[in-house]
Amino acid sequence: MRASHIFWNLLGLSLPLLIAALTVPHLLHALGTQRFGLLTLAWALIGYATALDFGVGRAATQRISALRAGTAEEQRRIPDVLGSAIRITLVTGGAGAVLVWLALACGAYTLLRAEDVPSMEIGWSMALLALALPLQALSAAYRGVNEAYLNFRGISVMRILLGAANFGVPYLIALFTPKLYWLVMSLLLSRALAAWAYRALAHRCLERAQANSVVTWSLDEARGLMRFGGWYTLSSVLNPLVASADRFYISSTISAAAAAIYVIPYEMAAQSLIVVGAITTVTFPYLSQRRVNDPAGAIRAFYLLLLLSLAGMAVVSTGFWLLGDTVLTLWLGSALPEQSHEVIRVLGLGLLPFTVGTMYVALLHASGDTALTAKLNVVEFPLFLLLAYVLIRRFGILGAAYAWVLRISIDAMLLAIIAETRRRAPALRLWARRTS
């Protein structure tokens, strides 16, 4: 693993955010609030469509990374993993598209309240959008192969181009027509091109590794992918629910305006975590491969990356504590309530435990332990919902920030204890036998 992998990954995550910040105000002006609101729903649906791969993309990354470090016989099974991942994601993504079309046949598009947009325009747009779902799921499978081969440069270039297409092309179309289905058509075409490009990059990785690029189906590999991906998907569903519960609690117990005061600094803190995401995305396939033939070296690399991540986020956390209110004022003006300044300071305290927890998740998943983290999330889910509710009732929006920091800290502590216990378990068992 090289520093350039992290650099390219960070570039691919940050530049699309910059493109969005530059183009969204112009899109809002060109489309109007109602069509722009519907376009944001289309973006959200495509974003959630990534979950339709049911974690198979991440499972493929883990499995292929491990096979790459194995014998020649094991490496010949890599095309089987890719072929199985492709078939699974086509089925799951296709099922998602069929569900959308069934909902349209039942008149679901009439439930969207947009008086200035004809209902048929909304219906046709949703029908086109459904076609993007299997493409998005399929891209996740091919992207998993690229991550296994540490091709983060190719992935990042694709993310940047896709980000530009996601926001820039609809803006160009809006200069000529505000019709929603033309905007959605551009999203569909960009996903089709992205799926084709990810496929080409994946096959190039196989060819450079002198592996057979003819993909095949394997029931055994499919079962392994679904087992890993199923538990990973459970965590992926529960974590966003817990993360978004606080703003719903605030809206219902205080006011919608109070939710906006909280969400602004929360999103500021959340976006700063792309640095951690860039590192862990590289760490996961690297550890998945190295743990096979050099377990001790993998652990040393993990601790080094953990320290580097903590050092970087310590700088960000300190910046939030000292300059967070200044940044918020420069960004949004002096009219921002004082409570937002207090919230960003508290949220900054959670950046370090978030880093610890995320890195230990990468370590556990590199060993295939998605079931363990998912079961932990199931146990934590109701407890953390109750914690957020109680603290918000007691302290208002500042209580939501306290709840987030406590949740992240407890989760990080438990993950670290579990991971370290599992890692040391063989040595402990050997010690127990010697001393008995």
Image (cartoon, rainbow, N blue to C red):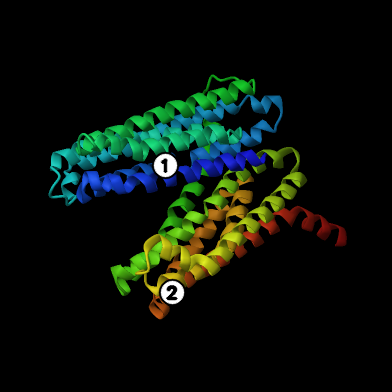
The answer, for residue 227, to whether it is visible in the render is no
Question: Whole-Å distance between the Cαs marked 2 and 1?
Answer: 33 Å
Q: Residue at x 24, y 33 (%)?
A: 182
Which residue is pictured at 49% across the width and 44% down the height?
Answer: 13
Q: Estimate the x, y position of residue 276 in percent, counting from the top left.
A: 57, 52
Q: Position of residue 229 (x, y in %)?
A: 50, 43
Q: Is residue 92 above or below residue 415?
A: above
Of labels 2 and 1, the one closer to you: 2
Measured as percent of width and height from the top left, residue 53 is found at 44, 39
Q: Which mark is residue 50?
A: 1
How many numbered dots are placed on residues in this image? 2
Check disc 1 and report its element: helix, strand or loop. Answer: helix
Please tell me in which quadrant of the rendered image residue 391 appears: bottom left
Name which residue lies at 58% across and 33% down: 151
Is 209 left, or right, of 346 in this rendering?
Answer: right
Q: SS class of the residue under badge 2?
A: helix
Q: Is the C-beta separation of discs 2 and 1 under 8 Å?
A: no
Q: Is residue 184 left or right of residue 357?
A: left
What residue appears at the point 61 percent right and 44 percent down from the top-left corner? 284
Side (left or right) of 430 relative to 292? right
Quadrant of the snapshot with the C terminus: bottom right
Q: Nearer the viewer, residue 379 or 384?
A: 384
Tell me the amino acid under the disc marked 2. Leu
**Crowdedness of circle 2 by 10 Å Cα count: few (<14), some, many (20+)?**
some
Mark 1 crowdedness (10 Å alpha carbons): few <14, some 14-19, many ≥20? many
Camera-nearest residue between 66 and 341: 341
The residue at which mark 2 appears reads as 398
Q: Is residue 219 left or right of residue 237?
A: right
* Quarter location, residue 212: top right
The earlier-in-sequence mark between 2 and 1 is 1
Residue type at tag 1: Thr
Residue 321, compared with residue 61, is above or below; it is below
